[in-house]
Every structure is written in structure tokens, then in C-alpha cells.
């Protein structure tokens, strides 16, 4: 039976520790409980907000309607032949714990995605990626509940329309479905992906690194650069790395020879947002309750006592400055939930094309 809480605090359910409350809050630990939650919202004509680990959201204010925390668990091998292993994962499973469990089972392919916060069900929405690997490369299909009918539908990789930190769940299916499980294609054959320069350099002294060593190295790299949300609230990367036309990237490279460029295609190049923000002078800047991390310019942090509006204003000002200096638009990586105080952030939005 689902327990519904009214006027519930959400501060403990987001890694930025931003204050917010929900009209109603519940936890769904199964598909049946999720249906109960949807029926509750339907009867009261409440809007629905889905919450996983809270590691990729910004609460801009209180949330109207029903917030459903997804806690559907389970990891099981469901198929595969030869070296291939198909693994079905409940949407509420912690992502990093899934990676560690897979390594224990000698199921390989997720090690480059170690220590990414959040739950498995959120991974396809963002098409999470790190150190040269994206979820899409390991993804087979997912199960999701349609909000209008409560039916379970299955979507394969093509239907999810994965892109760089993007998927159909940010577009046509936004607010239409709730992911309940994902199925991944892993392998019992160790074949570490070492193309990412920072990772390759960190493992240079090891002749043939194992997937376990790759995971441990990535954890060390991330911990060195990124603050622990339990100690300094954050959502990791706050902005996406911008992808721009090759000609524009080369013009910037001519002006800034130390700017790293990462080719995406013959027409597009990816720029490191952290470099742009750092070069603009924002690394380590603090504004009262919020600021930019002093070791990683891509990470915005909440020192306590602040609000989502404070953080969004800082982000908007950073984006405006980067746009002025480099003519490059930054886009938020986390989702914004709750009412946004447009009066406090529209100056940055106007100047930078800053998009919520």
C-alpha cells in the first residue's frame, strides 16, 4: 500500500540540498504501487513529477501536485549467448551500485560509467556518459508505464532516440511515461574502453588494465575533481559541453590555442564547458550561499541556506559571460523542477540564450 505524504519536504531528496516541498509525496517500489500513485493523482487531477536519486535536478521552488519517488529494485540476467549477457535492472537501482555488482558478476561494459550518481531509470533520459562511453552503447531496451493508461510499453534503442545527453524522454515523451526497468547488453569478455585521453594516461603504467582497474581509476579521477554531494551539495556537471560548427570551433582555436577540441563529426566539434567557464574567471567564485567549485569549473555548489533561484541566477550570469566572451551558448544539464523566478534569471537568459 502506498503512503501519501502532504506538504512534504524534498530537501533530503535532491543532491543540491535545495529547499522545496511537494503538495503530495509518495514512494513506488513496484509497478503496482506506481499504478496506485497514478490513480491517486488522476482522481485529484494532480500534475505528476517523477523523482529518482535527485542527482540531476534543480528545485527552483515548491512542486505542485504529486511527486513520485521511483524505488523499483531488481538486477537479473535475462538472456545472452556466448560472451553476451542481457541484464534487466529495476529503475530504482542505484547506478554506481549496479556498476559494482556487474563487475562482481564479471559482466563488463559499464566500468567507464562508474561513480555516476543517480538511479538506473534516469540513465536513459540523460543518456549518461563518461570517459568515452555512453549508455546508448550498452542499451537494449526499456520498460515504461504510460501515464494516460497505466500500460507497460517497451522501447528499443532506436525508439529512445539517444543523442548527446539527450533522448526522446526530453522531447516527445517528456511527461508521458515513467521508466520502470532497463535492459543492458554486457559481456563476460573483458575489453576495456581506453580511448579517453585522461583515462589512458592514468592507466599508462598498466600493460593490460582489467575492467576492475578501469573502474577504480575512474572513481579516483572523479573523486579528485568532483566534490562529494554529501559534503558539498552539487549535481556534478551543471552545463553540457557545447557542440558547435567546426568553422566556429577553429576560429576559437585560433584565438585560444590551448582550447581543447573534440571532433563529433565532419560538421561539428565539442568544446569543454569547464574550460570556457574557467577561462572566463568563474572557477572558485562564491556568491553567498552558492558558488563554483574551486577544482572543477563545471560544478556549481550549494553551501547551505540558499535557493534554486540563487543557483539559477549564478548559472545564468556564467552563461551570459561565456556567451559574451566566446559567442558560445551554454545549456543546463540538470532539469529544473518547480516555479522559476523569471525576474531573477531572465537577464542571463536574454544575454546568453541560457535555456532552462
Image (spheres, helix red, strand yellow):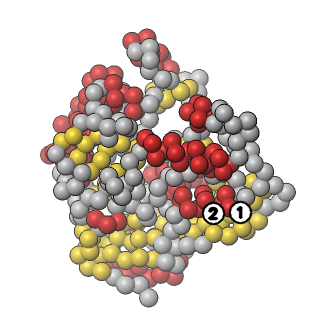
From the top left corner, tell me how far across and down residue 170 is, in percent.
45, 52
Say which residue appears at 16% left-offset and 45% top-offset: 288
From the top left corner, tell me how far across and down residue 356 is, in percent.
31, 46
Apparent side of residue 189 relative to residue 321 in the rendered image (left or right) = right
From the top left corner, tell me how far across and down residue 272 is, in percent.
44, 30
Among the 4 quarters of the image, the one containing residue 353? top left
**How many residues crowd mark 2 within 10 Å: few (<14), some (14–19), many (20+)?**
few
Among the 4 quarters of the image, the one containing residue 230? bottom left
Say which residue appears at 44% left-offset and 17% top-offset: 258
The residue that mark 2 highlights is 101
Count of numbered tags: 2
From the top left corner, tell me how far across and down residue 255 is, in percent.
39, 12
The secondary structure type at the circle numbered 2 is: helix
Marks 2 and 1: CB-CB under 8 Å?
yes
The residue that mark 1 highlights is 105
Give the farthest residue toward the bottom.
Answer: 1
Give the farthest residue toward the top.
Answer: 254
Say which residue appears at 45% left-offset and 77% top-offset: 28
Say which residue appears at 29% left-offset and 40% top-offset: 292
Give the farthest residue toward the right.
Answer: 82
Mark identifier at residue 284: none
- Report whether residue 135 is seen: yes
Nearest to the observer: residue 77 or residue 177: 77
Amino acid at each position: 500500500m502506498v503512503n501519501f505524504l502532504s506538504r512534504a519536504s524534498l530537501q533530503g531528496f535532491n543532491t543540491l540540498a535545495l529547499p522545496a516541498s511537494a503538495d503530495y509525496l509518495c514512494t513506488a517500489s513496484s509497478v503496482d504501487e506506481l499504478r496506485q500513485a497514478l490513480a491517486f493523482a488522476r482522481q485529484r487531477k494532480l500534475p505528476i513529477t517523477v523523482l529518482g536519486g535527485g542527482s540531476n535536478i534543480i528545485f527552483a521552488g515548491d512542486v505542485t501536485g504529486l511527486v513520485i519517488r521511483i524505488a523499483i529494485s531488481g538486477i537479473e540476467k535475462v538472456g545472452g549467448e556466448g560472451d553476451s549477457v542481457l541484464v534487466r535492472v529495476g529503475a530504482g537501482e542505484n547506478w554506481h551500485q549496479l556498476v559494482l555488482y556487474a563487475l562482481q558478476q564479471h559482466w563488463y561494459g559499464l566500468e567507464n560509467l562508474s561513480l555516476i550518481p543517480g538511479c538506473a531509470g534516469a540513465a536513459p533520459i540523460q543518456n549518461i556518459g563518461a570517459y568515452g562511453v555512453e549508455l546508448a552503447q550498452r542499451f537494449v531496451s526499456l520498460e515504461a508505464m504510460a501515464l494516460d493508461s497505466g500500460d507497460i510499453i517497451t522501447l528499443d534503442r532506436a525508439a529512445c532516440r539517444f543523442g548527446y545527453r539527450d533522448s526522446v524522454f526530453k522531447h516527445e515523451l517528456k511527461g508521458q511515461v515513467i521508466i520502470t526497468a532497463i535492459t543492458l547488453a554486457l559481456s563476460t569478455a573483458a575489453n576495456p574502453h581506453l580511448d579517453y585521453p585522461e583515462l589512458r594516461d592514468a592507466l599508462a603504467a598498466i600493460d593490460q588494465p582489467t575492467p576492475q582497474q578501469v573502474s577504480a581509476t575512474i572513481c579516483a579521477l572523479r573523486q579528485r575533481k568532483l566534490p562529494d554531494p554529501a559534503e558539498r551539495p552539487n549535481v556534478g556537471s551543471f552545463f553540457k559541453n557545447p557542440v558547435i560548427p567546426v568553422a566556429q570551433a577553429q576560429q576559437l582555436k585560433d584565438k585560444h590555442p590551448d582550447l581543447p577540441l573534440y571532433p563529433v563529426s565532419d560538421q561539428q566539434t565539442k568544446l569543454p564547458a569547464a574550460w570556457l567557464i574557467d577561462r572566463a574567471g568563474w572557477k572558485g567564485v562564491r556568491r553567498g550561499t552558492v558558488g563554483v567549485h574551486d577544482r572543477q569549473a563545471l560544478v556549481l555548489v550549494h553551501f547551505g541556506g540558499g535557493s534554486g533561484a540563487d543557483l539559477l541566477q549564478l548559472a545564468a550570469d556564467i552563461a551570459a559571460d561565456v556567451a559574451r566572451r566566446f559567442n558560445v551558448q551554454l545549456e543546463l544539464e540538470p532539469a529544473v523542477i518547480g516555479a522559476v523566478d523569471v525576474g531573477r534569471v531572465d537577464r542571463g537568459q536574454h544575454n546568453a540564450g541560457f535555456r532552462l
